[in-house]
Image (cartoon, grey):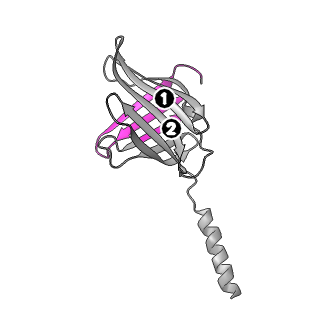
Amino acid sequence: MKALLTFCLALIIFSFGNIDSSKAHEDQQVSFDWMLGSWKRTNNTDNSSTFENWIKKSSEEYSGVGYTLNNRDTIFKEDLRFFYKAGNWNLEVTGENEKPVIFPVSTYASNKFIAENEENEFPKKITYQLQNDQLLATITDGETEIPFIFSKTTRK
């Protein structure tokens, strides 16, 4: 009996030791503060300029806007929002004349996250990472991948 109890205790300890701390499920201490501020895309392929701006509204909500300018005309705009609900962080993306699409955050580290929605046509996966003072973003459906490299234009 003592051996069975020891085995069960060891199994419980081993199981807790294998929890993936990068999962962004019930951890309300997740912070996206590393994304705050204004960012300009440095790898545009045409004469346009792409920007993202992020602010922190509360410990459970961040708000952003992404837009592309061609000369002074806005040719693309989307509203972005991180929000904490029902034990999970979510990225909400709303384009012009579109319904919001929710991407639950599936993986989180101190300077990176992955948000996924397999039901969305494109993208299905959104990744952001802060690396060497650059904000690296990728959107993909598993076949097509579009990288975005941003440099900070203002302080948070």
Judged by its main secondary structure, the magenta piece is: strand
- Mark 2 vs mark 1, CA separation in Å: 8 Å
> Contact (CB < 8 A) between labels 2 and 1?
yes
Q: Give residue 77's mark.
A: none
Would residue 134 be counted in the magenta stretch?
Answer: yes
- Span shown in magenta: 126-155
Task: Identify the residue at image location x=32%, y=23%.
Answer: 45
Q: Looking at the rendering, in which quadrant would you find the C terminus?
A: top right
Q: Quadrant of residue 42?
A: top left
Query: Of all residues shown, which one is farthest toward the top?
Result: 72
Picture residue at 55% right of the left edge, 28% below the top: 55
Q: Is residue 116 left or right of residue 87?
A: left
* Magenta-span inclusion, residue 6: no
Determine whether 43 is above or below 126 in the image.
above
Label drawn at residue 82:
2
Residue at position x 59%, y 67% in the image: 15
Tell me the element at label 2: strand
**Residue 64 tag number:** 1
Residue 155 placement (x, y as % from top left):
59, 22
Q: Residue furthest bottom?
A: 1
> Relative to the observer, which residue lies in front, 129 or 83?
83
Q: Is residue 3 above or below residue 36?
A: below
